[in-house]
């Protein structure tokens, strides 16, 4: 039996089951949702089991309660194939004695929600899973803890063993659990296979609308080129149309992007809105990101050697890797990840804001003394803009780097941390 690699979501799932009757685990296909849920489930029904799929769906229409019989917590895998189960589970949670009754997993939002009449408020809680962070896949030493930084740790000390070449490989391999233990050549194939599945079939599952595979390819390629940017759908439409005989409307692009969002392939980042000393206008557009950098690499048709020969592209995709990891870590700390940009040109790549009001400011740089210095200056400038009479001071300022052997705190207080040494 294949050894299970512990996930940060394990402890989150256990905690959520203690507080609600049902937990819905959402996230991209193949990120490990079912395997994680299986570690704690006492019984399971796989709705998409080829031998039982039609029977399961039919039963969900005739007698959905029958599918819920079993030891608890009971796992209903790919529940979205039978949306009627939602209200049945909600009813069961109301009438059973005890919490932690059900775990639902889904790699897509249900295409048809007319069968769902209740929001699930008070009965359901949600957990988002993403591909593995470097810490979960064993590629980060975990010497530097975000939790410790939020708790006020003065000194930081950590080491990273990631070489430039290894980092390029990890960007292209991604955090897909099955790929982690494969030899490198085969591991790289997995992201390409995932991308091909999205193009040819998975994107159509989102809304049951058949889409043009070539246009999906062009959209995903354009999306990959605009990683970390706040570009509107009109820009994506122009980018696609430049290589298409027919024009592509903004509405078509919006529908394709929404389909990718429903199957958790893209996960854009909202803007942070802090209290500022000045009346600077804040740009509120979301920043474009794939849920994993390997999808962007596959969409661009590039590999590790291509990244090492094109540092600009490497930097963009490295940022996507960092955002993925920061989101995984923030979930464990009851936090969210945002970006900041104002009309004066001040930016901050990532802001981790916790529910208790604490927050940290992070600039992401591939590496090199000049870029680290640039990131530190930007962070200090951002810090000076914050109105600390109306909000807390940041818990930490961090330049998150790709290269570099050690983590340390600069004399100006800015932490320099290689991604290969970070954990939640």
Image (cartoon, rainbow, N blue to C red):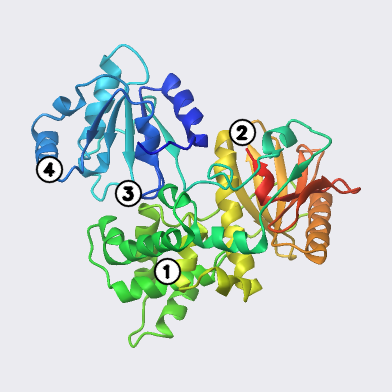
**How far apart are labels 3 and 2 at the CA level?**
27 Å
Q: How many marks?
A: 4
Examine the image and state in which quarter residue 310 appears: bottom right
Q: Tell me: residue 88, above or below residue 252.
A: above
| Residue 417 vertical position relative to residue 89 in the rendered view, above or below | below
Q: Kindly identify which residue carries mark 2.
A: 355
Q: Evaluate if marks 1 and 4 touch, with contact meaning CB atoms under 8 Å apart.
A: no
Q: Is residue 393 left or right of residue 49?
A: right
Location of the N terminus by quadrant is top left
Which quarter of the rendering shows the C terminus?
top right
Marks 3 and 4: CB-CB under 8 Å?
A: no
Badge 4 density bin: few <14, some 14–19, many ≥20, Cα 10 Å: few
Residue at point 40%, 59% (across, down): 190
User: Looking at the image, can residue 125 be seen?
Assistant: yes
Residue at the far bottom in the pictured view:
245
Asked which secondary structure carries label 1, the reply is helix
Question: Label 1 belongs to which residue?
Answer: 220
Q: CA distance from mark 3 to mark 4?
A: 21 Å
Q: Which residue is mark 3?
A: 108
Q: Earlier in the sequence, mark 3 or mark 4?
A: 4
The residue identified by callout 4 is 51
């Amino acid at each position: 039996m294949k050894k299970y690699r512990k996930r940060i979501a394990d402890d989150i799932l256990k905690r959520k089951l203690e507080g609600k009757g049902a937990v819905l685990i959402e996230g991209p296909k193949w990120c490990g949702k079912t395997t994680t849920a299986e570690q704690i489930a006492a019984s399971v029904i796989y709705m998409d089991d080829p031998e039982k799929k039609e029977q399961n769906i039919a039963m969900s229409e005739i007698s959905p309660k029958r599918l819920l019989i079993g030891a608890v917590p009971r796992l209903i895998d790919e529940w979205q194939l039978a949306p009627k189960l939602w209200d049945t589970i909600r009813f069961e949670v109301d009438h059973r004695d005890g919490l932690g009754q059900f775990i639902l997993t889904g790699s897509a939002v249900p295409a048809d929600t007319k069968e769902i009449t209740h929001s699930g408020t008070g009965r359901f809680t949600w957990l988002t899973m993403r591909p593995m962070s470097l810490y979960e896949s064993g590629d980060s030493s975990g010497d530097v803890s975000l939790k410790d930084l939020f708790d006020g740790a003065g000194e930081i000390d950590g080491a990273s063993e990631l070489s430039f070449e290894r980092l390029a490989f990890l960007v292209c391999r991604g955090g897909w659990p099955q790929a982690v233990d494969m030899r490198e050549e085969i591991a790289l194939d997995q992201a390409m296979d995932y991308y091909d599945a999205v193009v040819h079939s998975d994107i159509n599952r989102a809304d049951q609308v058949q889409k043009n595979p070539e246009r999906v390819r062009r959209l995903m390629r354009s999306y990959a080129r605009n990683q970390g940017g706040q570009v509107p759908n009109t820009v994506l439409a122009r980018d696609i149309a430049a290589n298409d005989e027919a024009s592509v409307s903004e509405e078509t692009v919006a529908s394709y992007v929404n389909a990718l969002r429903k199957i958790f392939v893209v996960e854009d980042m909202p803007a942070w809105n802090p209290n500022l000393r000045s009346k600077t206008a804040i740009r509120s557009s979301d920043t474009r990101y794939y849920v994993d950098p390997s999808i962007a690499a596959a969409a661009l048709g590039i590999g590790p050697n291509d990244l090492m020969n094109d540092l600009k592209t490497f930097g963009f995709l490295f940022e996507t890797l960092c955002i993925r990891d920061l989101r995984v870590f923030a979930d464990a700390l009851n936090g969210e990840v945002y970006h900041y940009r104002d009309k004066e040109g001040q930016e901050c790549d990532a802001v981790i804001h916790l529910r208790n009001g604490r927050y940290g400011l992070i600039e992401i740089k591939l590496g090199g003394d000049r870029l680290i210095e640039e990131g530190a200056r930007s962070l200090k400038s951002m810090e000076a803009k914050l109105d600390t009479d109306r909000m807390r001071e940041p818990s930490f300022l961090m330049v998150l780097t790709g290269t570099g052997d050690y983590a340390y705190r600069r004399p100006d207080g800015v932490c320099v941390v290689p991604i290969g040494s970070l954990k939640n």
